[in-house]
Image (tube, rainbow, N blue to C red):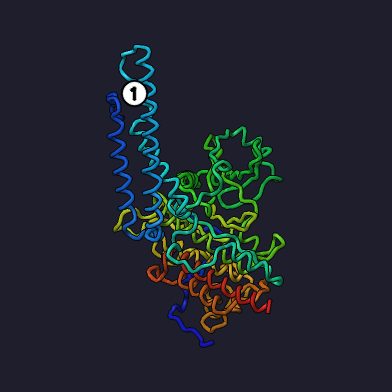
Amino acid sequence: MKPRHYNIPRVGVVDPTPAAGSPVLASASASSPAAPHAVSTPGRALTQRSEQIDTGLFKKEGRHGGFLLAIPVQVFLRGLVPGWVRWTLSQQQAREHRLSSGRAESGDRSPEPFSPIDSTMVAATTSGMFTLCFESICPCFGSKREDGSEDPVLARHSNYYSSSELRSISDRIPASPLRVPASPSRFSLSSSPSRNEPLNLSLEHVVKLTHNFSPNLMIGEGYFGKVYRAELRDGRVVAIKRAKKEHFVSLRAEFSNEIALLKSIEHRSLVKLLGYIDKGNERILITEHVSNGTLREHLDGLHGLVLGFNQRLEIAIDVAHGLTYLHLYAEKPIIHRDVKSSNILLNEGFKAKVADFGFARAGPTEPEQSQIETDVRGTAGYIDPEYLRTNHLTIKSDVFSYGILLLEILSGRRPIEVRRDAGERITVRWAFAKYNRGKVKDILDPMLTEEVNEDILNKIFDVAFQCVAPTRNDRPHMKEVAERLWKIRRDYAKTLRRAEVAFNS
């Protein structure tokens, strides 16, 4: 392959001084009674209306080919609807005749009662019969609009494979350990509302649920505090994050900020806030429990299984969806500021959820405003160098962090590998050098045993290195990143199909 030469000599990386992975702080009107036998007048009007419907309904070709159904529907309307109206009116007249005869024999001269089968009922029933019969002839007439659960970013791209198709392809190749979970929508809920509805727990209840914050129930620990697993009476499992006492004062703003932001967002690729406690010397967040650990733990092989290329691609798409929602579709633009592998949680189906919004900030809200000035927050190795240099934060700062994360997902290496030689210590520089020489397969995690098409690798590394461009103007938006990853996913599905054909031949 011809070597690639891009004018990105340092790929936007500044040598960090902190240790790798350490946080950087800085009404209807009444109707009058009808006159006797007046029902014949609306009957004639109804018959005329049916003829108008008959002749004018399908003069233009509809979206579903209604023009082709014009002739049989017209025949149906001419034959059935007027006949039914005439039968209804004859039954009405016969009933009125019987009532009149009975009153004459009894000498009753009171006004005739109002007929229950009036023009409104005739019209409504006729309309109902027409709709029912037409739906029987043309099922598309009553069909609902297409389900909106799939990602609208890709609505205009019809040539892609569904997740179920990819799973089917993977399952039929015995040597492949890949499993492709369905890609979630940016607009879908985190989970079923019945399972993730808000909680109102007291501090005493939380202490009881966690057995007084027992170390045996601790499932994680970060700069903010420790995270515990707790099971509610209804069987739901939640995560309880308790702030560290030593950082109590300094993290006051982060705690309030995380609550405010989490309360305003809901997406299946973002961890959902269920409740919080801010009382006395305790600050506690209660979120949905994501049971399968962090992405970093899986890249390190701590859960016993190696993530396949398929799964890594799906995780990258999930995270891209979550960040796209934060940047474009939340009530206010939200910049996460701490996108990293230890803040990406996986469930049992290996669906990814972005967590830990302690450093998140509301982004620019005015049309002419593209950045906000703030102290630097984040983790060494993931921080946008332009933000680090100028204190100007934009949504493109998250894009840089995502590019670093994408390289980490593919290579398995942390952004800063302190135990490696100087030439390999900064992962993005090492990977870019390999990429520029056309040796993209050398960047892949050696724990990956499957063969991946080199064209697919070039496309996905193209995305990663554009995300980590030195200047933010050269970086794509997360929406574009999500679109490109979906196309790569489609192309990868085609390579799986070709592999399946070759295997069966």
Outermost residue on the bottom side: it is 2
Callout 1 crowding tier (Cα within 10 Å): few <14, some 14–19, many ≥20: few
Q: Quarter of the image for the N terminus: give it.
A: bottom right
Outermost residue on the top side: it is 107
Q: Nearer the viewer, residue 189 or 12?
A: 189
318 versus 172 height, above or below: above
Q: Mark 1 falls on what kind of element?
A: loop
Instruction: Tell me where residue 299 sits by quadrant.
Output: bottom right
Q: Position of residue 216 (x, y in %)?
A: 71, 45
130 versus 396 height, above or below: above
Q: Nearer the viewer, residue 180 or 411?
A: 180
Q: Nearer the viewer, residue 73 or 488?
A: 73
Residue drawn at (31%, 54%) of the image: 366
* Total labels drawn: 1
> In screen coordinates, is 101 left or right of 160?
left
Instruction: Tell me where residue 351 sits by quadrant.
Output: bottom right
Q: Return the residue at label 1.
A: 114
Q: Position of residue 257 (x, y in %)?
A: 46, 46
> In screen coordinates, is 38 left or right of 235?
left
- Asked whether the viewer can see residue 301, the reply is yes
